[in-house]
Image (cartoon, rainbow, N blue to C red):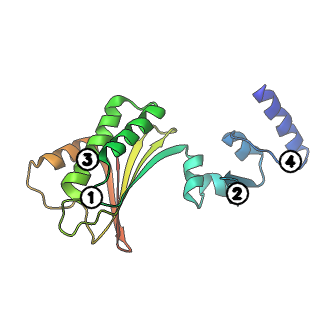
Amino acid sequence: MVSEVLAVIRKLAKEGMTMMIVTHEMGFSREVSTRVFYMDEGVIYEEGAPRDIFENPRREKTRNFIKKIRSFTFKIENRKFDFYALNSGIENFCSTHLLTPRKAHSIQLVVEELLFNKLLTRPGAEADIELKVKYSEQSGKVELELQYGGGEFNPFAEAEADGEISMLILGKLSSNVRFEHGDGRNCLQMEI
């Protein structure tokens, strides 16, 4: 049925009929549309030509939807945050998106090492951390992003003693590490 309906809509579009279609069929939408409106929470979140929306979306939710990126966010506002809730959230996110228990454990281990052995223990560290776990359904990649306040601090650039267990764990479980600092915020991203 779906392919038959899409064929009829394609035919009507070629004949020049103006239509407004609500769909989750992104490939089809890109192919037949002259204008795309991405809606989120009941409002038009972003609009533009199909090429703009599908190749260069300006807003994060649009990018995540187009790239089929699912995410889990956890905010840490003080040192006495609920670590068990964080671990449970990561586990539930991984389970929901059919990631293996081993992948979930790797994410949890990297998060624990970064938080407790790097970010929250440095002198003058602030407990102002936003953690995101992003999963791309298209590529199957899992990315971890941490944004945190304070002066410029990249845990991977620090001169660490050779063989430090935290760095060995982080080096083994993460790849493609990227770091930026600007406007008093640090942003650390890595694939797990």
Q: Residue at x 89, y 41 (%)?
A: 12
Whether residue 166 sits left or right of residue 32 in the image: it is: left
Residue that carries the numbered disc 3 in the rendered image? 112
Q: What's the distance in space between the residues labelled 2 and 1, CA to CA?
A: 37 Å
Between discs 2 and 1, the one toward the N terminus: 2
Check disc 2 and give the amino acid type.
Val
Amino acid type of the residue that numbered disc 1 sits on in the rendered structure: Arg
Q: Is residue 156 visible?
A: no
State whether residue 52 is above or below residue 15.
below
Q: What residue would you read off at disc 4?
A: 19
* Residue behind mark 1: 79
Residue drawn at the location 29% of the way across and 70% of the way down: 150
Please tell me which residue lies in front, 169 or 85.
85
Q: Secondary structure at mark 1?
A: loop
Compared to residue 182, the image places residue 83 above or below, namely above
Quick one: label 4, few (<14), some, or many (20+) residues within 10 Å?
A: few
Depth check, mark 4 against mark 1: the one in front is 1
The residue positioned 70% from the left and 58% from the top of the image is: 44
The amino acid beneath tag 4 is Met
Tell me which label, 3 or 4, sits earlier in the chain: 4
- Whichever of callouts 3 and 1 sits on the residue coming sooner in the sequence is 1
CA distance for labels 3 and 4: 51 Å
Question: Taking 77 as reference, is 67 above or below it?
Answer: above
**SS for tag 2?**
strand
